[in-house]
Image (cartoon, rainbow, N blue to C red):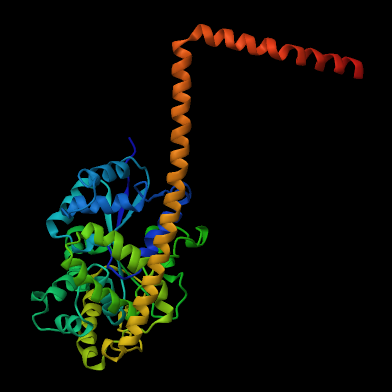
């Protein structure tokens, strides 16, 4: 029986190009397996999400139970290497990491951590949290992250569980070994968009130029400042009305956030980290850079990529209420237009369903009649043939005359 030799776990961190990598791996799934011997397991990326939910005991997903074993068996049956890309793995504890290593043995686990500078990550994370039903203002979010007791705050505990690069590298390399831990940095703005793909390919062992540059579109784009404020103000209303998170994720995170508001990003303001909050971000980034440099892990990229970049922009308090109202009105119009189009299509399909149902009932009635009176059916068919006989004879005579 074939044995997979390496299992690459791309564990994040969130907002470090993970969606880009996942979409591109999925777009080249068959070609990577055939030409590079690299398996991207599961029928879709959603199977990997379910597997991580199963591993970490995260609620959600109808088929979560047993999903990790299904994915593990698929990788075990593969004779080459496999890659799983799911950023929720980054917060796994040592016990879960040890279980993963034991479950896939004798395959060697290779951990891949993509990392982005904290200046951009903080801003991107805030708007992403808002699309996951959080309600923190930008000012409160920054205050909690920069607090001396940040791990005891709601925002800080969530953020640093996923973004503390020092802790992340220490925890995973402590189980799999620093020689099997790879840190891939994202370049600063202005670099070739293919750089991340090229760096991931270096770790995973394939030629990036051989695989189509598809899958990167429709990535997990951040929201503009005005749209982020719309989401922040909508979220408490959904709680007030008792909307469950599963319904929220479908109706608000996806339908409103990803499908509508995200496409307005180029038309809106960018949130900026104020100068009085930049100091602690630089200090934390410097600690992360130093810890990675001394960890002995395999670095792909440059540690200077992790030096914070603070893009120009505005604070929410600087955005006039009219601009947020305009954004909300545009979103309402877009959502309503989509709803109307969906309702029209639904009515068309319902009318077609009704017609087909009527035809089916008529056919069933005819079959029942024929089964009840088979003799009458047989006689009727012969009578019909007799009635058509003169016309058939005349037609054949005309054919003979013409010849």
Quarter-of-image position of residue 262? bottom left
Q: Is residue 383 visible?
A: yes
In front of the other: 331 or 308 = 331
Residue 390 spot, x, y in % from top left: 76, 12
Residue at 23% x, 43% y is: 69
Q: Is residue 310 visible?
A: no
Quarter-of-image position of residue 291? bottom left
In front of the other: 383 or 68 = 383
Counting every numbered tag in the picture gives: 0
Residue at 71% x, 15% y is: 388
In front of the other: 354 or 105 = 354
In front of the other: 14 or 330 = 330
Residue 351 spot, x, y in % from top left: 45, 44
Placement of 12 over or under 189, stated as above or below: above
Position of the N terminus by quadrant: top left
Quarter-of-image position of residue 380? top right
Placement of 224 over or under 1, stated as above or below: below
Residue 303 spot, x, y in % from top left: 32, 78
Position of the C terminus by quadrant: top right
Residue at 24% x, 89% y is: 278
Residue 302 spot, x, y in % from top left: 35, 77
């Amino acid at each position: 029986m074939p044995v997979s030799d390496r299992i690459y776990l791309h564990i994040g961190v969130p907002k470090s190009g993970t969606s880009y990598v996942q979409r591109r791996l999925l777009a080249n799934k068959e070609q990577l397996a055939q030409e590079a011997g690299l398996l991207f397991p599961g029928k879709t990326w959603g199977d990997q999400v379910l597997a991580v939910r199963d591993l970490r005991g995260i609620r959600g997903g109808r088929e979560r139970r047993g999903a990790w074993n299904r994915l593990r068996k698929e990788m075990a049956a593969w004779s080459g290497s496999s890659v799983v890309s799911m950023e929720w793995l980054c917060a796994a504890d040592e016990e879960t990491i040890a279980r993963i290593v034991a479950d896939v043995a004798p395959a060697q686990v290779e951990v891949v951590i993509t990392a982005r500078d904290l200046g951009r990550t903080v801003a991107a994370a805030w708007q992403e949290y808002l699309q996951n039903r959080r309600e923190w203002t930008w000012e409160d979010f920054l205050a909690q992250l920069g607090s001396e007791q940040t791990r005891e705050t709601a925002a800080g505990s969530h953020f640093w569980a996923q973004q503390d690069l020092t802790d992340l590298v220490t925890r995973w390399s402590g189980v799999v070994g620093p020689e099997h831990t790879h840190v891939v940095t994202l370049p600063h703005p202005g670099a070739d968009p293919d750089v991340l793909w090229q760096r991931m390919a270096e770790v995973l062992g394939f030629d990036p130029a051989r695989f189509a540059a598809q899958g990167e579109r429709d990535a997990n784009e951040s929201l503009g400042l005005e749209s982020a404020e719309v989401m922040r103000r909508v979220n408490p209303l959904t709680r007030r009305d008792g909307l469950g998170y599963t319904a929220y994720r479908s109706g608000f995170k996806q339908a409103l956030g990803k499908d509508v508001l995200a496409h307005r990003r180029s038309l809106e303001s960018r949130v900026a980290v104020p100068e009085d909050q930049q100091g602690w971000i630089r200090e934390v980034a410097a600690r992360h850079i130093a810890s990675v440099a001394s960890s002995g892990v395999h670095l792909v990229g440059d540690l200077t990529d992790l030096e914070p970049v603070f893009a120009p922009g505005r604070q929410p308090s600087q955005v006039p209420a009219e601009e947020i109202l305009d954004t909300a009105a545009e979103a309402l119009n877009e959502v309503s237009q989509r709803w109307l189009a969906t309702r029209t299509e639904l009515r068309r399909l319902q009318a077609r369903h009704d017609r087909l149902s009527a035809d089916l009932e008529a056919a069933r009635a005819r079959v029942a009649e024929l089964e009840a009176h088979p003799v009458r059916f047989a006689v009727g068919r012969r009578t019909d043939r007799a009635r058509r006989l003169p016309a058939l004879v005349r037609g054949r005579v005309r054919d003979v005359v013409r010849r």
